[in-house]
Amino acid sequence: MSDNTDDPNPASDATTSAADQQTRGRAAAGALHIDEPGELIAAVPAMVGFTPQRSLVVAVLASSLDPERAPIIDAVARFDLAPASGPRRGLAAAYAQCVAQICATEGTSEVLAVIVDDRVRQPCRTRGRGAGVGPWGTLIAAFARRLARQEVFLAGAWAVGAIEAGQRWWSLLDAKQRGALPDPATSMVTVAHVLAGRPIRRTRSELTDLLTPDTELAQQVAVHLDAALALARQRHTAALRHGDLDRHQRRALELVLSQIANIDSGAALSATDCAELAAALRDRTVRDSLFALAVGDHAAVAEHLWIVLARACSGSDRADAATLLGYSAYIRGDGPLAGVALHAALDAEPAHSMATLLEISLRTGMRPDTLHRLAHCGLGIAAELGVDLGPAIR
């Protein structure tokens, strides 16, 4: 097997009937070979962006252009596992439906599965061949049958208690196949991700914590928000009266860009700054132009700003900031963060149209390169306002 890391497709997190959360995405960029099940399992944290726990991880395979080379891991999906003693009826069907949809999008028909669960125990060697190995064997067998109905083949399935060096893994399809995990930190896939600047988080909670509302700051921002909105409306009305709306929107865009420059210089945003930024983003022309930052030199700093705003605001203001963050993370291949951000946006404003469209794109496995048009539209909008956001580097 090899891990294809050209043109990463991000992972996404979305509440579904299949599981509480699911994550999917292209594994990463380059052609790194994974020749052993243990190496595949050790590479899972790098491929999903964090170390999964109590999860079903599915790798979607694509044929290599070289017929003599092993298949390429083209996409990865992660599903939360139900409690071991809880109801599992319908899980296999829901998981299979989601994976089959990804396979259809990618034009492939072969997958691998890994169960990561501290509640599983390695079976004794006397067991024969069959999918009944371990407590999740029945689920995997049903999952394989459901996939087969949609002409998708489960080529391998393994279980492990935790993704740590020395942990024992075993096959869920053949009880005789087992081994010990190498150190995940030394996995070639992990090394490639680290060198590419891709974060590998210890747990998924590190992602959700990034967007946990800052109650104290949010209260301070709320004090200033009405005044900031009133001033923005006043300036908007005056611009319309004088036929100079472009100038007003250009100033609002420049305000956002100046704050990004301040953050890049080490400055912290005040509550007043956050209120003014939230008011600026309520202008859809300004907001839409800012999607262009996801493909420019200042993407990382802009993401920091979106995180601060999302934590400091509520309702549509939180949704706008989280959507900008979700898009930027999506474009650069950080699918887990993209999914968490879009979930936060839709939780804050369920009818947010852009967040909805991006969440659907993630859920259906759409590749990032198909969404670059949004960033290029943003560049065009900014240019029409007289603002040069710089060249696209992604």
Image (tube, rainbow, N blue to C red):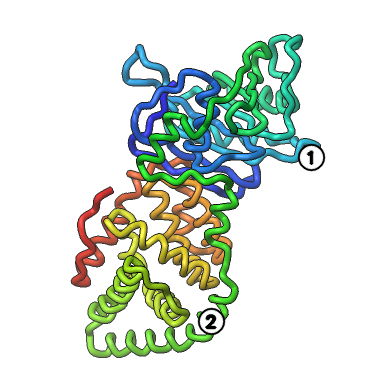
Question: Is 198 above or below relative to 125?
Answer: below
Give the residue drawn at x 57%, y 58%.
209
Quadrant of the image occupied by residue 232: bottom left
For the residues marked 1 and 2, what is the alpha-carbon distance in whole angstroms?
43 Å
Q: Disc count in the image?
A: 2
Query: Compared to 110, does 45 lie above or below?
Result: below
Give the number of the disc on residue 86.
1
Given residues 363 and 126, the one toward you in this image is: 126
> At numbered mark 1, what does the secondary structure look like: helix, strand or loop?
loop
Q: Position of residue 302 (x, y in %)?
A: 36, 62
Q: Residue at x 75, y 11 (%)?
A: 127
Picture quarter containing residue 320? bottom left
* Residue at the (41%, 49%) spot, across then down: 330
In which quadrant is the N terminus drawn?
top left
The residue that appears at 54% across and 61% down in the rendered structure is 211
Callout 1 amino acid = Gly
- The answer to which of 113 and 261 lies nearer the viewer is 261
The residue identified by callout 2 is 220
Between disc 1 and disc 2, the foreground one is 2
* Badge 2 amino acid: Gln
Front-lying residue, 65 or 222 = 222
Which of the 4 image quarters holds residue 34?
A: top left
| Residue 113, percent from left and from top | 58, 27
* Numbered disc 2: secondary structure: helix
